[in-house]
Image (cartoon, grey):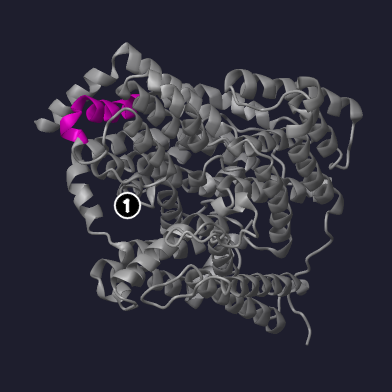
Amino acid sequence: MELLNNLALGFGVALTFENLAYGFFGALLGTLIGVLPGLGPVATIAMLLPSIYALEATPALIMLAGIYYGAQYGGSTTAILINVPGESSSVVTAIDGYQMARKGRAGAALAAAGLGSFFAGCVGTIIIAAFAPPLTELAFKFGPAEYFSLMVLGLIGAVVLASGSLLKAIAMIVLGLLLGQINTDVISGVPRYSFDVPQLTDGIGFVAIAMGVFGFGEIIANLGQPKENREVFTKDVKGLWPTFADFKAAWPAVIRGTALGSVLGVLPGGGALLASFAAYTLEKKVPMKPGEVPFGKGNIRGVAGPESANNAGAQTSFIPMLTLGIPPNAVMALMVGAMTIKGIQPGPQVMTSNPELFWGLIASMWVGNLMLVVLNLPLIGIWIKLLTVPYRFLFPAIMTFCCIGLYSLNNSSFDVYMGAIFALVGYTFYKLGCEPAPLLLGFILGPMMEENLRRALLLSRGDWTTFATRPLSAALLLAAVALIVIVTLPAIRSKRKEAFQEE
Amino acid sequence: MKIKSERDFWSGVMFIAVGAAFAWGATEYRFGGSARPGPGFFPFGLGVLMAILGAFVLFKSLTIESEGGDPIGPWAWRPLGVVVGAVATFGWALPHLGMFVALPLLVMVSAMAGSEFRPKEAIVSAVILTFGCWGVFIWGLKLTIPLWPKFIGA
């Protein structure tokens, strides 16, 4: 068995003391920065890049990978506890996870997220090992038209996410796409909507929007309410562990999320983010059992599914990076940079020219995931203690971490000012009843969508039918149309309304 | 014409205004054609789409009845002003006055956003948070953040 030989080689590399130590350090650091809203893996890996000059290539990459998946764990912790997604991929986790926390079930939510992530991480590792070569061929078939159609499908899928008006949710996506247009045009190099502010030519930071809208905006909204109906947590925390019923409800969601995340993670541009959104959409489509808590009100499936999916996606997003040398997201782009620093040309040849690195990295992911579970499950008790802190102590602390995080993004006050502006914007959305989650997804996918749309049109010489005549692209667009039709059908529409309004 | 949903009415107005502004701004950039889309192509299309969606929202808010008029309700001016102000002040103060001044300032000011302001508690949490942040960010993560006011350090 070639696979077993390869994995044996990998574990031989990953289980050396040095690599274990760097893997553990990476996972720990990743969890820490994931818990701190604003300080993400991108900033941390960027800060650590100079330090890897002193390291061998394999431990360096193992450590960086540890930061990446450690941050996925940590990011979901803040999403659940204080409704501030530490990572873009835990935006949907916040929807149901935070509601669970408010009902005193933070422990169950955190455990479901941790165990689901571990399961997904194990499966993801096996998938990378077994399917890396054939799966890259699937990714090869994707041209710009397919990417564009896939993103349309992803965005439409996200609409089903929003509670409230479908029309306003679509409008919020478009608003997100428009905010993503404040940047330097990738193709022509023209700065757009920058008003001669140099910082705006790099675009608005995702973190500034997320913190402003979800962090500060939420604080303002909470403080604005009379003390009685403020969005706070119940004091009685019901057990640190999920009940048997929780396990029974969560495990099918974990399996579905893992499967979906593994597939979507391979596609460049998607990765963990798209996987978590798609998994949440899927969970909402699965029929409810009688007596189940509705989505958006603290359903455990809404935590387990997306969390498994984003971890599976985070793992399998290594496939295009390791095999094609194409980074599917910003973190992978830095990994490519790290490999180049160490004199390794990322691409299909890595598997044959540096087998210890390739398989050692894969094996270390599994080891790292195990470490994370061991590290995180005991910490749940500590995280829950945090919730019993009165709000008047909690919100200045949240603001402190957010502000430091914003400043340290680029070591400049500019992102702090942007955070302040988006605090105002976020509160306005709250008052107008506009859901901000779709906006964030639109914002992240906007530049990629534009690039692929324009590439596709360039390739087809301005022929718009290219999106409909390429079979894969047509199938993806059809799925998007079908989603809209299904959601607007009167019967389902009233169901959807019911689901969101039930208490 | 009577507004049937106040929230949707103003949402619609906001979407139309933002969409129109982006579309108008896009005319500054080369539009190009379908075959060679320029930098203004995508934002213009999006801006127009946004305005159209906004018009639909606006239209709905004037025609479809909603429960109790769906009012926006009173704005929480005090938390809004204090939070936004505290964050903006911090943005200015950190590079000029350093973390050991800017952070306590941020905590003290933002504590005033709540209806219950207790000076003693605010001072205690300011001290704890400042040292906690020093431990995590400066000592632990080695971030380069100015610590003291410029006129002392330099």
Asked if residue B62 lies in the magenta stretch, the reply is no
Image quarter of the N terminus of chain A: top left
Q: Let me know if residue B21 appears in the view.
A: yes
Main SS of residues in magenta: helix
Q: Quadrant of residue A143?
A: bottom left
Q: Quadrant of residue A17?
A: top left
Say what secondary structure mark 1 lies in: loop
The type of residue carrying mark 1 is: Leu
Quick check: A239 above or below A109? above
Q: Quadrant of residue A186?
A: bottom left
Q: Residue furthest bottom?
A: B1
Chain letter of mark 1 equals A
- Give the labeled residue for mark 1: A267
In the rendered image, residue A483, in percent from the top left (x then y), is placed at 41, 69
Quick check: A315 above or below A226? above
Q: Which residues are magenta?
A: A350-367
In the rendered image, residue A10, in percent from the top left (x then y), is placed at 22, 24
In the rendered image, residue A121, in percent from the top left (x then y), is placed at 35, 35
Answer with left or right where residue A364 lies relative to residue A421.
Answer: left
